[in-house]
Amino acid sequence: MKVYGYTKDKQGIMEIENSLKAEQAFVGGLIECTALTEEMLWSI
């Protein structure tokens, strides 16, 4: 799956495995679902 993120060495679109374990490893912890609002989308 493609994600937008950043690490010490890289920022931008990255490819990670489409699994909960890979997502948790990428963020270094738990995953939480949130709803995006129009205000949040326009602030990016």
Image (tube, helix red, strand yellow):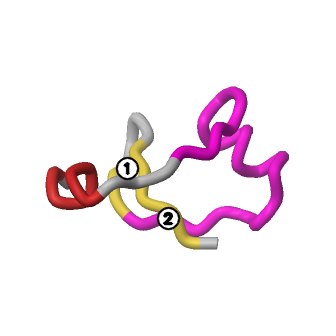
Q: Is residue 42 left or right of residue 40?
A: left
Considering only vertical position in the picture, is 9 above or below 15?
Answer: above
Residue kind at label 1, given as amino acid type = Lys
Residue kind at label 2, given as amino acid type = Met
Name the foreground residue: 9 vs 2: 2
Name the foreground residue: 38 vs 43: 38
Q: Secondary structure at mark 1?
A: loop
Locate residue 8: give its quadrant: top left
Q: Which mark is residue 10?
A: 1
User: x%, y% of residue 1?
Assistant: 64, 72
Locate residue 25: give its quadrant: top right
Name the foreground residue: 22 vs 9: 22
Q: Which mark is residue 14?
A: 2
Q: Is residue 4 left or right of residue 40?
A: right
Magenta range is 13-34
Q: Residue at x 49, y 51 (%)?
A: 35
